[in-house]
Amino acid sequence: MTIKKIASAIDHTDIRPEATAKDIKNRCLEAKFYGFHGVCVNPKFVSLVAKELKGTPIKTVVLIDPYMGLSPHSKRLSMCKKAKNDGADELDIVLNIVDVKYDRYDKVLKDLTPLCKILPTKVIIGSGFLTDEEIIKVSAIVKKAGAFCIKTATSKDPLENREMDEKVIHLKLMKKYSGLVVKASGNIKTLDDIKKVLRAGASIVGTSSGVKIMKSLK
């Protein structure tokens, strides 16, 4: 597994509520230095990231509606459209996890489909909240909705603090039953972690430890 392959898989992430514009500019500089796939931020920083990354192949990625995807559809639609107008290249949207838990799969699909038409979309399923059967069901829905990628988790997902072996199982299910690009995220902090999720079928890895991981390669 080459250094370039690892770097190009990383969505360099800073979704901390306390992050400043200076912090986000630093994340962009780091992404350009190492050649990361993207920089993932909260909506308020999209225009800044787009400006900092202009002229590079690095994606401006925005996290939408963490951590359970509970906002009304109209608000979610508005957030996605604004992100596009602000310069986002990709959306990382949390599906409505409560709807999944109550078997409202038709509602999940109806919500996601128009959102996925706005920009290339990764749908975050909150896999740590779900059973294996629910992961299989939502994997098919994410594909049907038109997303290009299915993503495990964001902050506060129970999977974040579980064993990596369990994450690997979820990734394999998501890959098999969606047939989409898979993004792994949630407590991926070391070179060993990133190698495990890439071997499990992930193509993109969301982590705030990208610089630490790259330095460990030297």
Image (cartoon, rainbow, N blue to C red):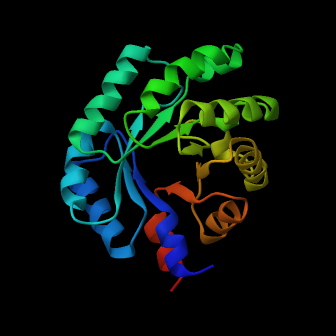
Numbered disc total: 0
Q: Is residue 188 left or right of residue 12?
A: right
Name the residue located 36 percent from the left edge and 18 percent from the top edge. 75
Q: Compare residues 108 and 36 and report the one nearer the observer.
A: 108
Q: Residue at x 47, y 65 (%)?
A: 210
Horizontal placement of 94 versus 118: left or right?
right
Residue 174 seen in this snapshot: yes
Rendering quarter of residue 35:
bottom left
User: In the displayed structure, would residue 174 be above or below residue 24?
Assistant: above
In the image, residue 158 sits, relative to residue 11, either above or below, namely above
The residue under the point 80% across, 35% down is 132
Tell me if residue 155 can be seen: no
Q: Position of residue 211 (x, y in %)?
A: 43, 69
Residue found farthest to the bottom? 218
Location of the N terminus by quadrant is bottom right
The correct choice, above or below, for 181 with respect to 110 in the image is below
Expressed as whole percent of the image width and height from the top left, the position of residue 76 reads 39, 23
Please determine whether, in this image, residue 108 is positioned above or below residue 137: above
Instruction: Estimate the x, y position of residue 138 in percent, counting from the top left.
Output: 68, 30
Residue 148: image location, x then y, percent:
53, 45
Which residue is drawn at the image coordinates 46% and 33% (left, top)? Answer: 116
The quarter of the picture where residue 134 lies is: top right
